[in-house]
Amino acid sequence: MPAGYLGGMESDEDRHDRTDHEIELLAERLWAWSREPADDPAPGLGQLAAAGFDVTGRTAVYGAGRPCVALLLPSDRLREFGHNLVAAAVLGAALATAATLESGSVVVTDRPADEIDAVLTFQPGVHTWAAAPLAARTELRVTVHGNSGPAPEDTTDAVASLVQVFTAIAALRARLPAGATVQGIVTHGEESTDVVPDFAEARFGLRAPDSEALGRVVTEVTAAAEGAAMATGTKANVERFGPIHARFQDNPVLSGHFARQLAACGIHASPSGAAAVPGRAEVGDLSVRMPTIHPSVALHDPVRAVGSRAFAEATGSPRARTVLLATASALARTASDLLAHPALVRQAWDNFADRARRGG
């Protein structure tokens, strides 16, 4: 039982005060964790073990049974996406939640199991939204095979053909479904300008508002790549690179509750926009399995795009520290409320089931 607990039913206000106090005590440590080198994916897991968590790999559990709330760790700590702040906030929220835990369990992990009742996380961004949209997404790998023949007439340049693939895909963007995007990168060309490349490779990230629209984008991109290669005398192979990730399904019971706690911590969310934001693809997959939140909390003005060097630098700013501590407190408040009120968990699951019946 946490120190200072007097027994009986604790009010939400008192419990929130205690979680906020825990975050205040942890403030310097959390900020230091957010500045740790990016090759340490989850600084502070040892601190969870010292606080009584059962730590195995990248999963830490405190308490037992249901309700069970998961605080979602990112799989990396890339500053250009603000994942260093997410990791520190999640660890701080876990410690604060454990300090007020009376029943149920809290899990810190990057891969929640099916017995979880709610998944809580957030994404630093350029807007503060209670529910930040995440598109359905997948990646395609396009490999182009040319021919380094002995004579010029027998030669087909795979890299030049890949350039035409990019041109063809750029041309089809105007007829893609509304809200769909395609972004490509070259992953292999050649090592020397003295050799005509006979192999080139690229990856394309595809996003769409839903799985059906994503399927149409896959078909369009595949046809464009194969057609461009054929027109240049080369051959293109198109294959999916990784899984198809689901569109994020917000749980308004949870996201509304989190937004109220975030406001109490000094940051107010505005109505969510329609445009998809950068975020972790696995969050969309989790949201179709269990109640999940994915709010966005503004870290920088909109001209500093998530994923940029400027955004990475912003994760060390005074605003970033404010976001880290406020979000850690809001996550802890939300987690502790779910653990204290099984009726709130039931409301979240009822909303989840109703949305599933209506097909999202």
Image (cartoon, rainbow, N blue to C red):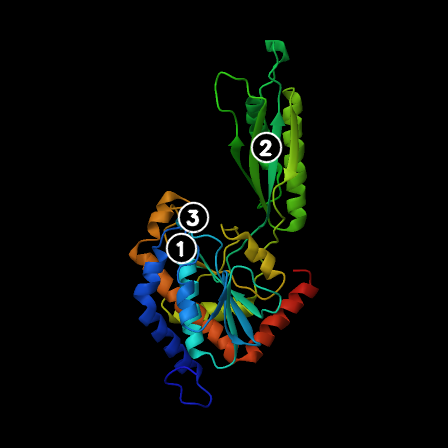
Answer few, some or many: residues within 10 Å of disc 1's Cα (few below 14, many 20 plus, some between 14 and 19).
Answer: many
Tell me if I can see residue 268 in this picture. no
Kind of residue sitting beneath label 3: Val
N-term-proximal mark, 1 vs 2: 1
Q: Which mark is residue 84?
A: 1
In the rendered image, residue 285, in percent from the top left (x then y), is placed at 60, 57
Q: CA distance from mark 1 to mark 3?
A: 13 Å
Front residue of 264/231: it is 231
Classify the position of the N terminus by image quarter.
Answer: bottom left
- Cα distance in 3D space between marks 1 and 2: 34 Å
Residue 318 on image: x %, y %: 29, 57
The answer to whether residue 202 is above or below residue 312 is above
SS at circle 1: helix
- The answer to whether 59 is drawn above or below residue 67 in the figure is above
| Residue 358, quarter of the rendered image | bottom right
The residue lying toward the viewer, choosing from 286 and 297, is 286
N-terminal of the pair, mark 1 or mark 3, is: 1
Q: Nearer the viewer, residue 226 or 46?
A: 46
Residue 359 spot, x, y in % from top left? 69, 60
Residue 200 shown left or right of residue 314 in the figure:
right
Q: CA distance from mark 2 to mark 3?
A: 24 Å
Instruction: Tell which circle, 2 or 3, labels the residue nearer the N-terminal end.
Output: 2
- The nearer-to-camera label among 1 and 3 is 1
Viewer-side label of 1, 2: 1
* Residue at the image position 63 percent from the left and 63 percent from the top: 289
What residue is shown at x 57% (from left), y 75% (from top)?
Answer: 345
> Which residue carries the number 3 mark?
306
